[in-house]
Structure formats: C-alpha cells, structure tokens
Image (cartoon, coloured by chain):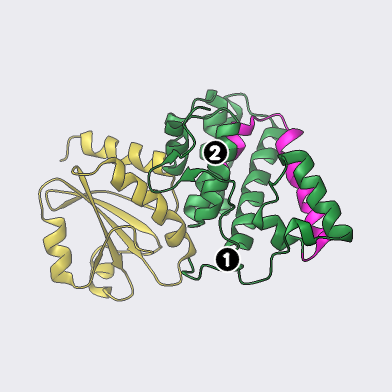
Chain colours: A yellow, B green
C-alpha cells in the first residue's frame, strides 16, 4: 500500500519535488518488507503535517535513472527535499515519532 | 481486506458448542462476560486445545505482567492499524478503553503517536520500542534497548512488550486470513474514532 503520491515518471518526480515547502520522497521496491512496514508510519507523519509536508513514493526499480542519480543502495531510502533541494536522507525503518523528529530537525537546520 | 461479509470458515455459535469447545467458550465468558465469545476465538475453536492454550497465553500476558493493560492494548491497536485489521482495531480500542484510555488516546495509538498516550515515560518509550521491533526487529541495536532501560524498563518489561507485539500480530493474521468479522458486542466506530455507546473510559 502506497503511503504517498506514487510517482510514475522522472518528469512527475521533478515537478513534485520542485514545489515550495517540504517534500519527502520514499524510494521503495516491490519485494521490500521494510518498505511495507514503514508505509503506515509515513502515512501518519503526512497526516500530522498536512499542508506542511508532501509525501511521494518512488519505485526505485522502475525509475532506475532516479535511483542512480540519488545513489539508492538500500530500501527504503527517504530523501527530504526543501524548495527542490535534497536536504537530508535516511534508510531503513523508523517510527512515526522518529520520522517527525527527523523532519523537524532538518527543516529547522540552516541549509548550506 | 476482503469485501466478503462472511467468515471463510464456519464459526460455531455458543449454543451449539460441546465438549472441549464448550469448555473454551465457558472460559471466555467467565473472563470476558456473558455473550462475549469473540469471533476470533470461535475460529480458533476449530482446534479447541490450541484455542485454550492461546487464551491462557493471552490472559497471562494481560494479567500477570508488570506493564499496564492500557499500554499493551495501545500496542495492539497500533498493530491492528498497521495490519489493516479493522475488526482488531475495534476490539483492541474497546479493550484499551476498558484499560482506562479515552478516545483521544485511542486515536493517538491508531496514529502511532506515543506522546498522545497518558502513560509513564517508560511505557511511552516501550510503545515506541514495540513499533520499532515490529517494523524491523533486526535493526534494533543495543543503544535502543539501553535508551528504554534508562527510563526504567526492565528485561522483563522488554519481554512483555515484545510478546504483546507477537500476540497482536498473530491474532491479526488469523482475523484477516479467515475474515472472521467484527463482534456484535464491539461499539467502537472506526470512521468516527469514537464509541457509539459513549466515550467515557
């Protein structure tokens, strides 16, 4: 079950991450158990930050150009974008609380 | 989740139960109250000895441990939400209310938000630990365990909360795979996130 807007093309991805505000890209794969397990946590995170954080889901196997560009080596990989720029990334499972803390810390941090 | 309104196996009603199955149903009613033989245990009842062992195990988990029922039912509510088991959410929301929780706390458990649970700091940390273990048990590192212990959790507390995860998941699996359906004695509305018979704990 997808936690966010499922991205079908690279152009869709570019459009999604370039919007103002925070966008969290969830790179997943079809046989990734942890990707399925983290989906409800991400959905809860998105609900609690509605209007402040958009969640998108990228199938790293289908969109291999994006996987290559962002050096996706394990799944799930989460990349946080702000104003089109990748500002943080993490891999593996995290609870909704941990994800919220991670997003807030990185959103508040000054970007170089 | 199936759209089929009927269970995939026959669920024997209490008035038709005999032998070991009747003994199981009698035990369920003695502990939970008259008429409260859940559909889950009607399904388990196809193997009465196993059902009895599982009911005993559940009772030990809920009555013999050191952690509060509210925490353990909050974990089970969260797991039911993760597993998309609506019957299980309604069941454990009811049990969580019986453990002293209000509807805001039940919504917090459904949203995996430990900060919304009126529990001790230790139990809120154990709620988080349970979710982490459920999400990826092999990613738990010593520092995760030490962090929970620093808030007062004992080795026994860790075992108890992990067994809560095991129990919740195994019951969710049964309920989903056999499509056992909601019990008619549950009053929690998933859509409205409230109790139809009033919200008082």
Chain letter of the residue beneath label 2 in the structure image: B
Q: On the image, numbered disc 2 is attached to which residue? A: B74
Using the numbered discs, state the Cα–Cα distance from disc 2 to disc 1 in whole angstroms. Answer: 23 Å
Q: With B198 as the anchor, is A11 left or right in this view?
A: left
Q: Which mark is residue B132?
A: none
Q: With A44 as the anchor, is B172 left or right in this view?
A: right
Residue A111 inside the magenta-drawn segment = no
Q: On the image, numbered disc 1 is attached to which residue? A: B179
Chain letter of the residue beneath label 1 in the structure image: B
Residue B69 in the image: state x and y as whole percent: 64, 33
Q: Quadrant of residue B39?
A: bottom right
Q: Is B34 located above or below residue B23 in the figure?
A: above
Residue at the location (28% across, 68% down)?
A: A67
Residue mark closest to the camera, 2 vs 1: 1
Q: With B136 as the anchor, is B27 left or right in this view?
A: right
Q: Residues within 10 Å of mark 2 (few under 14, many from 20)?
A: many
Q: Quadrant of residue B192?
A: top left
Question: Which region shows up in magenta?
Answer: B46-75
């Amino acid at each position: 079950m997808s936690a966010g807007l499922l991205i079908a093309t690279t152009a869709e991805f570019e459009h999604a991450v370039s919007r103002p505000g925070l966008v969290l890209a969830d790179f997943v794969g079809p046989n990734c158990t942890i990707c399925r397990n983290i989906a409800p946590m991400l959905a809860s995170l998105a609900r609690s930050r509605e209007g402040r954080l958009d969640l998108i889901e990228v199938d790293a196997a289908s969109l291999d150009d994006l996987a290559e560009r962002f050096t996706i080596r394990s799944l799930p990989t989460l990349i946080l974008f702000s104003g089109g720029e990748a500002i943080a990334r993490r891999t593996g499972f995290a609870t909704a609380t941990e994800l919220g803390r991670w997003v807030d810390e990185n959103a508040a941090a000054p970007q170089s | 989740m199936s759209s089929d309104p009927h269970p995939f196996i026959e669920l024997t009603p209490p008035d038709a139960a005999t032998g070991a199955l009747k003994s199981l149903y009698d035990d369920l009613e003695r502990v939970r109250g008259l008429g409260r033989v859940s559909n889950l245990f009607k399904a388990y009842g196809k193997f009465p000895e196993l059902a009895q062992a599982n009911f005993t195990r559940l009772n030990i988990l809920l009555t013999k441990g050191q952690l509060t029922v509210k925490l353990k039912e909050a974990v089970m509510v969260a797991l039911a939400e993760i597993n998309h088991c609506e019957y299980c959410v309604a069941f454990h929301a009811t049990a969580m209310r019986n453990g002293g929780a209000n509807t805001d706390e039940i919504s917090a458990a459904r949203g995996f938000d430990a900060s919304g649970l009126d529990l001790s700091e230790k139990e809120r940390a154990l709620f988080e630990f349970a979710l982490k273990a459920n999400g990826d048990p092999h990613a738990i590192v010593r520092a995760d365990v030490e962090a929970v212990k620093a808030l007062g959790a004992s080795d026994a507390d860790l075992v108890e909360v992990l067994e809560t995860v095991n129990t919740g998941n195994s019951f969710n699996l049964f309920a989903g795979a056999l499509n056992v359906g909601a019990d008619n004695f549950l009053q929690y509305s998933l859509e409205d996130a409230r109790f139809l018979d009033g919200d008082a704990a």
